[in-house]
Image (cartoon, helix red, strand yellow):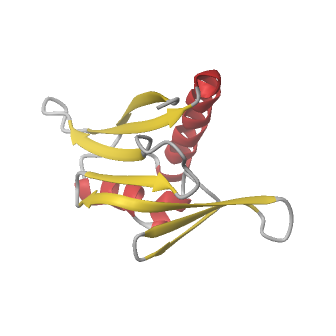
Amino acid sequence: MNKQQIVIENVLNSTSPNIIWGIISTAGGLRKWLADEVTIDGDVLTFTWGETWSHHEIRKARILEKVKNSHIRMRWEDETDDEAYLELRMNRNEITNDYILHITDYAQPEDVDSMYDLWEQNLDQLHHSSGL
């Protein structure tokens, strides 16, 4: 395994498991903060960044595990590292009842800082689009 694991925790301003689950597991929810377009066909998610009529990027991920109101784990179809995955996990803080979003991702050692920056941008977009 050449990639380094990245773990990010972000407190969400919600006590509703259904709202959080919708944000991390549905095409409409993921579209609010991870990509310009997201579609789900069975266990394959297709993410599109940019406009399809101009410069854009498309990546597909296969769902490895999905447990309602807990987590979704996926692996990019072009991933060559068998141990790398992307996981979005929701956990409830017992004291505040708010939910914490735990993100697990992987990056090459030289790309770790830029990956943290990208996730920070995604989380800012989540906050702006949904108030979470």
Q: Looking at the figure, which quarter contains the C terminus? A: top left
Q: Quadrant of residue 14?
A: top left
| Position of residue 1 measured from the top left corner of the image (x, y, whole percent) | 46, 32
Residue visible at 41% across and 66% down? Answer: 26
Residue visible at 59% across and 29% down? Answer: 108
| Position of residue 97 measured from the top left corner of the image (x, y, whole percent) | 18, 38
Report the side of 13 relative to 75 (left or right): left
**Count of numbered labels shown in the rendering:** 0
| Closer to the camera in the image, 32 or 102 | 102
| Position of residue 117 measured from the top left corner of the image (x, y, whole percent) | 61, 29
Residue visible at 28% across and 60% down? Answer: 66
Q: Indicate whether 3 appears above or below 66.
A: above
| Closer to the camera in the image, 101 or 88 | 88
Residue placed furthest toward the left: 94
Residue visible at 86% across and 65% down? Answer: 54
Residue placed furthest toward the right: 54
Regarding residue 49, the answer to whether it shows in the image is no
| Closer to the camera in the image, 128 or 49 | 49
| Position of residue 3 measured from the top left corner of the image (x, y, whole percent) | 51, 30
Regarding residue 9, the answer to whether it shows in the image is yes
Report the side of 58 relative to 25 (left or right): right
